[in-house]
Structures are given as C-alpha cells and as structure tokens.
Image (cartoon, rainbow, N blue to C red):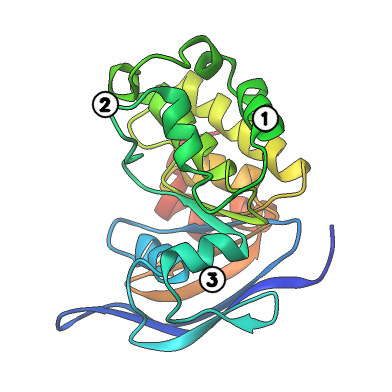
C-alpha cells in the first residue's frame, strides 16, 4: 500500500442554511487504502462525501485530489478527474435496464467500455443475469450492486460509498463488503461512509469517527475495533 496521499480534506465546513453539518474537519486518504468514516445519523458523514463530490458546496476549507484543489468544481469535472460515488439510497434509474444504468456511469468516457462492463459483471454475476431487466425491478441488494457497478464504470481512482449496507440482509451485506475489498485490491482507493461500524472497521485500513460534524477519534480499523468507547457507542454486542 502506497503512503502517497491522493485525497486531502482540510478544514472542511458544510452548511445547510443556518445549520453547520460539518464543522471544519481535516483528514487524508492515501492511495490504495480503504478509509471509513463512522458515526451516528447526522454526524456529517454523507455531507462530507457530497462536498468532496461537488454535489454540495463547501462553506469553507478545501479538498485536494492528487495535489490539485478540486473545491468548487462541478460533479462531472470531479468524476472526470477520477472520483466517483455510489450514493446513499442507490439512486439508480428504475425505468432503464441494468446495462443502461451501468453505461450511464461511464458518461464522461469516450473509449471502449467492453472490458469494464465485463469486470462489473464478473464482480456481480447477478447483474449479468439481469442485464436487460429494468433497474426498478431489482431487489434492494441487487440495486446496491448496480449502484456500485455504475460508479466503477467511470474507471475511478477513488470510489466513495455512502451507506452501501443500508437496509440489506446480513448475507447481502457480507457479500457487498467482500466486493469492496476486491475492488480495493484491484487498485481503487475507497472512502466509505457506513453505519455498520463493525463491518466497516474490519475492512478499513484507517478510520475516523465523526460526531456532530467533528472528527473525535482516528486510528487503524483494528485499533478502533478494539477501542472500548467505540465498542460501547457503535458496535454493541456484535462480534
């Protein structure tokens, strides 16, 4: 794993009207890592990802990608630079087929998609089986696979995942996390927001805890898994 920082967030603040959702956080993501942000609902995790992706405007602070400031750039420009996101709630196009949804993920590309489409189908055989089925007819787990596959079709260097396990059965959750590890092993850096802290910390190289818009703790995934305060707050009785 490279020690090179690919994504650097510096004193990022995000506001919604008079509400300060993210209150000046700073953290780095190194190339080749899985970094996870954990915290309760409303901690500012999703707002952080949306600001990095350019979907919401940062009130102040900066986001640097591969040494360049990308704060204020459009979402499509950020995708073109190599950062994609599978959003919370999946947000697939229900009336389009699975394959059409996947190809939309490659809207910034003009090269041949064949190899990348084949890789997504290799990762998610269920999607290949349902390639001509309307996205809206898929199960929740299949729609999550489609959202991740669509984000991969842009050939990202950094992929952000916002609550990929939300509302899914435990067996599907396990499968999704195995695929996240496989994606990472194939050279994609991953920034993961996840309420299932137990699963997220098990796959993460490093992790940050967000509480009411601030980072309160950081460490390796295994360090935070073993931290008694983290266990009590986020892990409950999970093993």
Quarter holding the N terminus is bottom right
- Cβ atoms under marks 3 and 2 closer than 8 Å: no
Dot 2 corresponds to which residue?
95
For the point 58% across and 41% down, the residue is 153
Which quarter of the image is occupied by the C terminus? top right
Residue farthest toward the top in the current orientation of the protein: 129
Note whether 184 is above or below 28 in the view shown. Answer: above
The answer to whether residue 119 shows anywhere in this view is: yes
- In the rendered view, tell whether residue 144 sits above or below residue 55: above
Image location (x, y in percent) of residue 143 = 39, 27
Q: Is residue 168 left or right of residue 219?
A: left
- Indicate the secondary structure of the residue bearing disc 3: strand
> Which residue is pictured at 41% across the width and 54% down the height?
233
The residue labelled by disc 1 is: 114
Instruction: Give residue 33's quadrant in the image.
Output: bottom right
Q: Secondary structure at mark 1?
A: helix
Give the class, few, some or many, for how many residues have Cα within 10 Å of label 3's Cα (few <14, many ≥20).
Answer: few
- Camera-side residue of 67 and 99: 99
Between disc 3 and disc 1, the foreground one is: 1
- Crowding around mark 2 (Cα neighbors within 10 Å: few <14, some 14 to 19, many 20+) is few
Relative to 75, is 42 on the left or the right? left
Q: Quadrant of residue 43?
A: bottom left
Seen in the picture, residue 150 relative to 8 is either above or below; the reply is above
Please indicate whether residue 114 sits to the left or right of residue 39 in the image. right
Disc number at residue 217? 3
């Amino acid at each position: 794993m490279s020690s090179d920082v690919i994504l650097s967030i510096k004193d990022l603040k995000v506001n919604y009207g008079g509400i300060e959702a993210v209150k000046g956080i700073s953290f780095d993501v190194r190339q080749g890592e899985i970094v996870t942000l954990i915290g309760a609902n409303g901690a500012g995790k999703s707002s952080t990802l949306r600001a990095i992706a350019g979907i919401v405007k940062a009130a102040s602070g900066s986001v640097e990608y591969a040494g360049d400031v990308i704060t204020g750039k459009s979402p499509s420009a950020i995708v073109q630079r190599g950062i994609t996101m599978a959003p919370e709630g999946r947000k697939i196009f229900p009336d389009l087929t699975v394959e059409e949804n996947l190809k939309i993920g490659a809207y910034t590309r003009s090269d041949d998609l064949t190899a990348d489409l084949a890789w997504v189908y290799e990762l998610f055989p269920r999607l290949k089986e349902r390639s001509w089925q309307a996205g809206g007819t898929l199960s929740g787990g299949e729609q999550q696979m489609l959202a991740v596959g669509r984000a991969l079709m842009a050939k990202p260097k950094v992929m952000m995942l916002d609550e990929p396990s939300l509302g899914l059965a435990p067996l599907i959750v396990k499968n999704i996390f195995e695929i996240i590890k496989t994606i990472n092993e194939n050279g994609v850096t991953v920034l993961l927001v996840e309420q299932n802290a137990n699963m997220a910390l098990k796959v993460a190289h490093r992790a940050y805890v967000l509480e009411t818009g601030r980072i309160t703790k950081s460490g390796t995934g295994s360090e935070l898994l073993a931290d008694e305060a983290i266990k009590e707050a986020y892990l409950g009785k999970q093993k």
